[in-house]
Amino acid sequence: MAYLVFRVIRILRFSYNKITRFSSGEFLKTYIESRVLENARFIVEHHCTVRECAKKMGSSKSTVHKDVSERIWGIDRGLAADVRKVLNINKSERHIRGGMATKRKKALLMNSKAK
């Protein structure tokens, strides 16, 4: 008896997971495409970094990076090329941004020690 109940529960669980995956898959794909386009347009319009875009959109840096570096190519190649230009500029300037961040950090430390 217990074996039969276990078997029925296992079959029901499998079919439920299959149905929910199938029914939500289409929505998920539409949602991802709209998020990718939104992230890409934001980066192009504001010439911002991936980190700034992630903060503004409320998602992780890894998600935004994957969206604008990989997923966008399958959706809109023209927008993908524009995003790539902005990302290349950001990459060429990142050593300068890092130096400025260190400079600000040291200034804050000096101000806090002076007080």
Image (cartoon, rainbow, N blue to C red):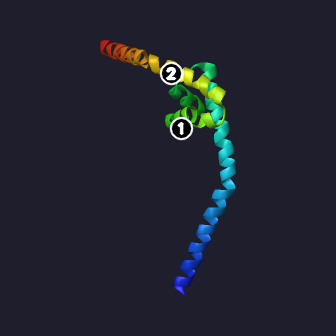
- Quarter of the picture holding the C terminus: top left
Query: Marks 1 and 2, how far apart in space?
Result: 18 Å
Spot the residue most to the left.
113
- Helix, strand or loop at label 1? It is helix
Establish if 20 lies above or below 84.
below
Measuring from the top left, give residue 79's x and y in whole percent: 64, 27
Q: Residue at x 52, y 36 (%)?
A: 60
Residue contact at pointers 1 and 2, CB within 8 angstroms: no
Comparing 109 with 62, the one in front is 62
Q: Residue at x 52, y 28 (%)?
A: 50
Measuring from the top left, give residue 48's x and y in whole percent: 55, 21
Residue of label 1: 63
Any part of residue 81 in sight? yes
Establish if 99 lies above or below 32.
above
Q: Residue at x 64, y 20 (%)?
A: 45
Crowding near the residue tagged with mark 1, few <14, some 14–19, many ≥20 C-alpha atoms within 10 Å: some
Residue of label 2: 88
Measuring from the top left, give residue 89's x and y in whole percent: 51, 18
* Amino acid carrying mark 1 in the image: Thr
Comparing 72 with 18, the one in front is 72
Picture quarter containing residue 30? top right
